[in-house]
Image (cartoon, grey):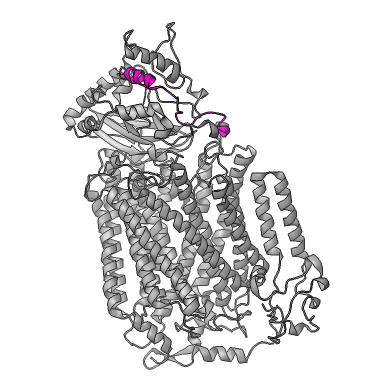
Amino acid sequence: MAIIERPGSDTTPAVVTASQSLGAVKRPVETKGWKEWLFTVDHKKIGIMYGVVAMFFFIVGGVEALLIRLQLAAPNGTILSADQYNQMFTMHGTTMVFLFAMPMAAAFANYFLPLQIGARDVAFPRLNALSLWLLIVGGLVLNASWFLGGAADGGWFMYAPNSGPVFSPSNGVDYWILGLQIAGVASLIGSINLIVTVLNMRAPGMSLMKMPVFTWMILVVQFLLVFSLPVITVALVLLMFQRSYGATFFDVSQGADPLLWQHLFWIFGHPEVYVLILPAFGIISEVLPTFSRKPLFGYPFVVFSGASIGLVGFGVWAHHMFAAGLGPVSVAVFSVATMAIAIPTGVKIFNWLLTMWGGKVWYTTAMKFAIGLVMLFTVGGLSGVTHSVAPSDTQQTDTYYIVAHFHYVLFGGMVFGLFSGFYYWWPKVFGKMLNEKLGSWNFWLMVIGMNLTFGPMHILGLQGQPRRMYVWTEARAGEGMFNLAFWNLVASIGSFILAVGVLVFLINVVYTARKGKASPLDPWDARTLEWLTTSPPKAHNFDRIPVVHHLDEFFHRKYEEDTATHTMKKIAEGEDLVRAEEEAAEKDIHLPGPSYWPLVLAIGVGILGMGVVYGVPIMVLGGAIVLFASYGWVLEPSVAEDIDFDPPSTDGSTKEIAPLG
Amino acid sequence: MSHIDPVLTKEKAIDTVTPVKSSRRRIVTALAGVSATVFLTGCATNAPQDTFVPKGPNAKIIDDLNMIVFPIAGVVGVIVLALATYIFMKFRDKGQAIPAQSHGKPYVEITLTIVPALILTVVGVFTFRGIFDLAETKDTELIINVTGQQWWWEYDYPVQADQGISQPIISSGQLVIPVGTKVLLRETSRDVIHSYWIPALNGKKDAVPGRIHLLRLEADEPGIYAGQCTEFCGLSHANMRMEAVALSKEDFAKWVAGQQKAYTAPAAGTLAAEGETTFINQCSRCHQVNGIKDANGKPIISAPDENVYSGAAPNLSHLMSRNTFAGAMFDLVNEECRADVWNAKSEEFGAKYLAGVSEDCLNEKDLRAWLRNAPAMKPMYADPSNLEKSNGLYRGMPNLGLTEDDIDKLVAYLLTLK
């Protein structure tokens, strides 16, 4: 953990001496062991922790999914009771959206966004740590419900009035509200942080239109979050007051209209869909050009289509409500708006394909996942077009056809994009290559598993099997080729193949950690700035802040065009470029110091939230911790006092990289 | 290509081109297969809730739109996936030089934006027309109020002289409609949101408490059309089914007459008469049977609102004219008789359906099990321990603790409710 200024000696041990510290408002100086992670504000460490947390919840959500598929493998399943099943599908959706997909995108954004724009950290490093800890606290609150009387059971969309105290009498929905509120605060803080980072901290010369597409998509996502999260926050607050304090916002007997919740939820919920998919689009917009050895085809079109997907995404929420009784005019308008959003999405697909056109395509695992995304997302996108025809949607909505659709776009799209990112950036983060052979198994098992699981759901849905039913009955199954029994079984088998595919990835991670071979500096002949540093990157990212002249700056430092043949000729290796940066290292490098307060504050927020269920005293305790942490946060010195180091530093310049404490 | 690190050249060798090529072909075939299967689903008639087999003009409007958008999606899908496959094959690394770094061609981009926009405009125009056609309600010939509650539907036919309905009919379990008649359902709910869906007759429409939503149904042929509640409505959502029964206009008139027939108490001294007493003591707190009187000749009016959160329980007048019970979760007729009705030719269907449930046809097993312990048959909030937040009101039917004797009597009595 670098703290301040110039390279110092690597061997000076530095630990806190309690007697000499300044008490509650001192800054931590630990640079080793678990404390280093707990108190870090380094965007890279925070990114890795985001990734670990997200992967944990991916497994949790995956196990929930497998239980669902076990229950539905045969008619009248008895693995789960109706109550358990309802909790299971609610928590599967909630976990996958809020605790896997968003944090995993945050992991990538945290780690690579500063690197891609040539920055040393995000704009507000302590807020960044707070986002992480709040997310973890939110996830814990949400899942604590399993052990405290049952999880939420109203579906991830939690429609009123079924989410009210009478219809969902356990505390599951309360934990759900609180967990999402806390995780929502985390996302909101994170989004402001990243927006400021992108707008203010780009390397000299990097205009917005020279920014890597991944960074662009993350930027669009943060704007979506900033504008959509407050809406769900309001909805959750209303629901919390209804459930815990006797308010009647969704109580029909008091004159409420339950559609209020639906509008609020989907005004958040639809932009949320793009929050989930755009980071994956960003990732493969890095991967496809790298492995095609060509720039992204139509960079401005991809950027603007991403931005317009984000914008139009705010105007299509009611397509989730075509059967909700909105009246023909609203339905017609939202139907057409929904068709319109297919256009920028189609633009992206074509641009990715044309990026490969005329390229020199190298099929690594990262590339396979990226191509998998393009193809599977196309299938999901087209089934999406069939929903945009509102009358058709009234036959499709709330059936498995919808489940098929959004798993093609979210699993085939988002998850494949994230896996592409794992394989692409793993050597950057850990300095070791994920095994390509295991990667190939990983990919093919996931492709086969995914198509076997979600492909049949098209049939199930169009044959009239609704979603969210804890059992299905033979009486409605039919007998011919499209009978529900056969395809439900296929889907269940597919889900286990999919699970094996994910397991192979985890094996690959362990194998790579133990026996993986060290990665060269620039293993993929990459194009963007994050590769213009060591792997893993130094604490301060860049020895010298790069000056940017091109889109794909790193590539253009390595190659120049042969004017005769119009092909590219290598003029420098990545290693040479990084060495040159090291030799020209800046003398003054300032990095933010670690801090206790993000963690303390997050814990306080968690306790405060539990107070809604467990009463005012708990709330007061949580509030006190939040207040205390806020003061600590504000009063914290910008760097650790010299006296906190052991031996005490007498000269600020030698505190840097004090690693052995 | 000397720039490639030796480590990676080795890596790359693992992914030799040939196996990738053949397996990619396989996956493309599989994907195309999936799209084709989706499309062909339209030809299957086997699952009762198949969404591609319209049996009335409203469902036909939707089906016509499906026949536009599904083929377009299918064709576009095949073209894109085929193009993608071609590109993956053609431009794989065969040792060619790194190409010029071209950033795209605006005219290609613009073309690829405009073409989908045009296709979608065409789809949009037809969609517009479909939406407004389906919302048409001016020429309604029969109104039925449909009310959802956990976990069954109530059908209430208001007085409509031209349909022969001279007093309100309240029924549940099966929606009975005349063929060739423009029926308008006025949907609402007494508790949470439900959704009414008979795929063969129309798309779904949510039943929302505090609101009335309109859904048009019309059946071309006599028969039974299956449906299912499609808005998640809590514990027994999966068990909230419906069946729409379409009868010829003459048969519908007979059905209406049957539903308006006065109550006849079972003859004194019979098992059924004892059952009536049991019913009055145990069941009539919630379940209404129109015309039933107590020992003093005073009409008995049920008060479900004192016991059930939604404030309603199925009206059991003429129970044996229906083929289902408990929110259409169970058949009131045994399998043989059920098959006989479901598979009847359209001209014989009406007579078979109107015959009702005879003693021979009764599904005694499920009916008795239900009377013995309803919550064991269907997940419900019927356990006094979890009624705190609903002020002690049940959601669903509780276990009444009936003896086998009581059950014998009740079954005998229920069989008289023709």
Q: Is residue B395 magenta?
A: yes
Q: Is residue B246 left or right of residue A9?
A: left
Instruction: Name the residue located 36 percent from the left edge and 42 percent from the top edge.
Output: B132
- Where residue A566 sits: x, y (%)? 38, 89
Viewer-side residue, A406 vs A483:
A483
Quarter that holds the N terminus of chain A: bottom right
> Residue B313, located in which quarter of the rendered image?
top left
Instruction: Name the residue located 41 percent from the left edge and 81 percent from the top edge.
Output: A294
- Where residue A344 sits: x, y (%)? 42, 63
Q: Is residue A131 shown above or below A236?
A: below
Q: Is residue B159 shown above or below B67?
A: above
Instruction: Name the residue located 17 percent from the left edge and 32 percent from the top edge.
Output: B345
- Where residue A490 sits: x, y (%)? 30, 55
First to last magenta residue range: B386-415
Q: Is residue A494 left or right of residue A62?
A: left
Instruction: Name the residue located 44 percent from the left edge and 13 percent from the top edge.
Output: B300
